[in-house]
Image (cartoon, helix red, strand yellow):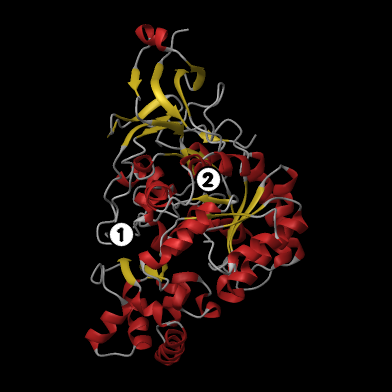
């Protein structure tokens, strides 16, 4: 047999969790054609990768990453996943999206999400249907995309920005739009219940929409209702939606600390994912009381024109900071003016001689809609390491980046999560075997989201592969320098094409739309 690409003498970690084995991997077109002793075919192969001392694994699958605007806008950040070994991204994290709307409504949504995705220069936002949106990725992305159904634009299409529960007829209209997405090949419904306007959905609405996804074998993925219900309540609502709708439920971006194991035990059908860092990242609006976020940044800015409201909000924020003083340590990673990058709310308030609540109100007026912060949860990196170990050890928790690329100093998870899992979880902590860690990044997410030909090194599977040095593969991205690329990664192959070759990006964009199978 003649191969387009032959990977010779590597240690294959196949994504299932099974023990590694030495083998050659032969690729023809976009498929793995043979695995075994294939040295005799080297002379006739169009290209050969020498992988002695290297691991050959499935390309990593990032089930929660905010990459769509970077991919469609063809910015440099579209390579961030490739630099970690990621070959497939799921779309619509937190229910975010822009398709199925008029250009005007889509622009309003873009404004509300600009803190997460950054300015979307050069994009028309003219995607009237799911198919039109998904077609826009063809030929321009280095990674594959598997579409999630974005709850946010569906609710805007039917109800605008109304801060209330849906009527029965409106829920039915939203369910029809979910069906359109599932017919286009989406893998399941995604929502983000701490974000406007979907925070106003009740459990019945979620069940009705998820039930449509269930008809197609889809999954329900949720950033839960943390602000309103707390972590445990948010987790339980997600599990309830899955049970009532009759489909697998997935809790976005969690970590296995003392609170979560009992919740996972209560709901053995639920999976989760984690970025394995001791800090999170979200917009400045997260500090504003939930009910007062109505309308997103535009609504908040309009209300802030009123001096009496500013004074009242400052008092409420002062109370919020007193309850959770760690929020004052959050620092700006992006903003409209760029004046406070790397500086915390605590520092900014002290320098201005203002109370924290008053300073936060001023910052809202100055920096929305692009204000994004990194939020330390409290523990130091060293203190957080036992949680990293417990998270990776849980067989139902995947690795995801929750990558946010916007701003001069984004959270390093967008550039370092996957190699970090191996550096910290496998080499430094010995928490899991390399085979188990790879499974959490490949086979487990592929199974959960019905990507049948991805996530495994097997004959007939798609040729999405990574080749790396197991002794040196590591993240370098830090909070101070979050865009530093990883090291020890030699090859990233997407649909049989080398997007990274010998440690260097090739500029190729062979990514495709994937459909659930």
Mark nearer the N terminus (2 vs 1): 1
Q: Which residue is mark 2?
A: 440
Task: Locate residue 187, reporting x and y percent.
Answer: 62, 43
Side (left or right) of 36 relative to 10: right
Badge 1 crowding class, 10 Å Cα cut-off, few under 14, some 14 to 19, many 20 or more, is: many
Q: Please name which of the two marks, 2 or 1, marks the residue nearer to the observer.
A: 2
Disc 1, SS: loop
Front-most of residues 18 and 271? 18
- Relative to 305, residue 37 above or below: above
Q: Quadrant of the C terminus?
A: top right
Of residue 206 and residue 88, the one placed in the foreground of this image is 88
Residue 38 lies, in percent from the top left, at 44, 12
Q: Residue sitting at 32 percent across and 49 percent down? A: 475
Camera-side residue of 360 and 233: 233
Q: Quadrant of residue 82?
A: top left
Name the residue at 26% across, 50% down: 484
In this orientation, does residue 96 appear? no
Residue 174, image x, y percentages = 68, 56
Residue beneath disc 1:
407
- Label 2 – label 1 distance at C-alpha: 29 Å
């Amino acid at each position: 047999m003649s191969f387009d690409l032959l990977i010779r003498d590597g240690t294959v970690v196949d994504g299932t969790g099974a023990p590694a084995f030495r083998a050659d991997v032969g690729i023809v077109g976009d498929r793995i054609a043979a695995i075994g002793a294939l040295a005799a075919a080297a002379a006739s192969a169009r290209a050969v990768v020498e992988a002695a001392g290297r691991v050959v694994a499935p390309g990593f699958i990032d089930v929660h990453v905010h990459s769509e605007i970077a991919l469609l806008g063809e910015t440099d950040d579209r390579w961030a996943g490739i630099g970690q070994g990621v070959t497939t991204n799921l779309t619509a994290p937190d229910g975010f999206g822009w398709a199925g709307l008029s250009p005007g409504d889509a622009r309003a949504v873009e404004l509300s999400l600009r803190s997460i995705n950054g300015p979307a220069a050069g994009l028309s936002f003219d995607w009237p249907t799911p198919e039109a949106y998904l077609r826009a990725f063809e030929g321009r992305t280095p990674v594959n995309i598997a579409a999630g159904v974005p709850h946010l634009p569906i609710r805007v299409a039917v109800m605008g920005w109304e801060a209330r529960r849906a009527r029965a007829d409106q829920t039915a209209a939203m369910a029809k739009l979910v069906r359109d997405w599932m017919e286009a090949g989406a893998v399941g419904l995604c929502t983000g219940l701490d974000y406007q306007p979907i925070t106003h959905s009740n459990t019945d609405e979620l069940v009705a929409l998820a039930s449509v996804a269930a008809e197609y074998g889809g999954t329900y993925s949720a950033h839960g209702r943390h602000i309103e219900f707390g972590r445990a309540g948010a987790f339980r609502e997600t599990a309830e939606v899955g049970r009532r709708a009759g489909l697998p439920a997935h809790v976005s971006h969690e970590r296995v600390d003392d609170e979560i194991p009992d919740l996972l035990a209560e709901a053995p059908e639920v999976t989760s994912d984690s970025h394995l860092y001791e800090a999170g990242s979200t917009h400045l609006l997260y500090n504003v009381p939930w009910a007062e976020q109505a309308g997103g940044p535009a609504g908040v800015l309009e209300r802030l024109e009123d001096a009496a409201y500013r004074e009242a909000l400052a008092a409420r924020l002062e109370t919020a900071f007193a309850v959770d003083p760690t929020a004052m340590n959050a620092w700006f990673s992006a903003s409209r003016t760029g004046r406070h990058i790397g500086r915390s709310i605590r520092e900014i308030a002290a320098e201005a001689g203002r109370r924290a609540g008053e300073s936060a109100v001023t910052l809202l007026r100055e920096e929305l809609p692009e204000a994004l912060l990194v939020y330390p949860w409290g523990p130091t990196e060293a203190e957080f390491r036992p949680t990293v170990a417990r998270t990776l050890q849980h067989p139902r928790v995947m690795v995801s980046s929750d990558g946010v690329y916007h701003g001069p100093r984004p959270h390093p998870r967008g550039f370092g999560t996957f190699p970090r899992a191996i550096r910290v979880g496998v080499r430094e902590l010995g928490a899991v075997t390399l085979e188990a860690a790879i499974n959490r990044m490949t086979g487990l997410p592929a199974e959960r989201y019905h990507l049948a030909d991805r996530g495994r090194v097997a004959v007939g599977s798609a040729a999405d592969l990574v080749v790396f040095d197991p002794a040196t593969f590591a993240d370098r991205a830090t909070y101070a320098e979050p865009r530093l690329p990883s090291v020890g990664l030699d090859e990233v192959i997407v649909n049989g094409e080398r997007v990274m070759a010998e440690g260097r990006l090739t500029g190729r964009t062979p990514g495709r739309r994937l459909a659930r199978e």
